Image (cartoon, rainbow, N blue to C red):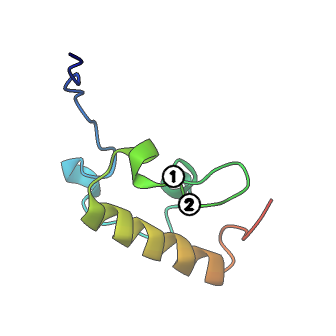
Amino acid sequence: MTHKKNRKTYDHICIPDTTYVDYKNVRVMRKYTTIYRRIKPRYYTKVPMVVQKSLARAIKNARFMALIPFTK
């Protein structure tokens, strides 16, 4: 019988100093995109669904404002 190990997830965005995902913070958003600038899924990033949705919205806003590229 196999048991899943309880992994401690560490959320970089939910640290008390960075509760708001800002589209101007390009350095944080690059951690959550692949080398081809696609948004990483939740099972890779280990962030909650609410944070993932706000992160995706911030990345899309930053792309529209030309702060990060659409593709590499």
Which residue lies at the image location 80% right of the left edge and 59% below the top edge?
A: 72
Apparent side of residue 40 relative to residue 53 in the rendered image (left or right): right
Tell me, yes or no, whether the two marked residues, 1 and 2, touch with CB atoms within 8 Å. yes
**Residue marked by disc 2:** 39
Q: Residue furthest right?
A: 72
| Amino acid at the residue labelled 1 | Tyr
Which residue lies at the image location 65% right of the left edge and 71% below the top edge?
A: 67
| Amino acid at the residue labelled 2 | Ile
Which residue lies at the image location 19% right of the left edge and 26% below the top edge?
A: 6
Q: Quadrant of residue 60?
A: bottom right
Quadrant where the N terminus lies?
top left
Q: CA distance from mark 1 to mark 2?
A: 6 Å
Apparent side of residue 62 relative to residue 49 in the rendered image (left or right): right
**Residue 3 place in picture, x, y as percent:** 20, 20
- Circle 2: element type: loop
Q: Any mark on residue 32, and which?
A: 1
Q: Residue furthest bottom?
A: 64
Image height check: is 68 above or below 41?
below
Q: Residue furthest top?
A: 1
**Residue 70 place in picture, x, y as percent:** 72, 71
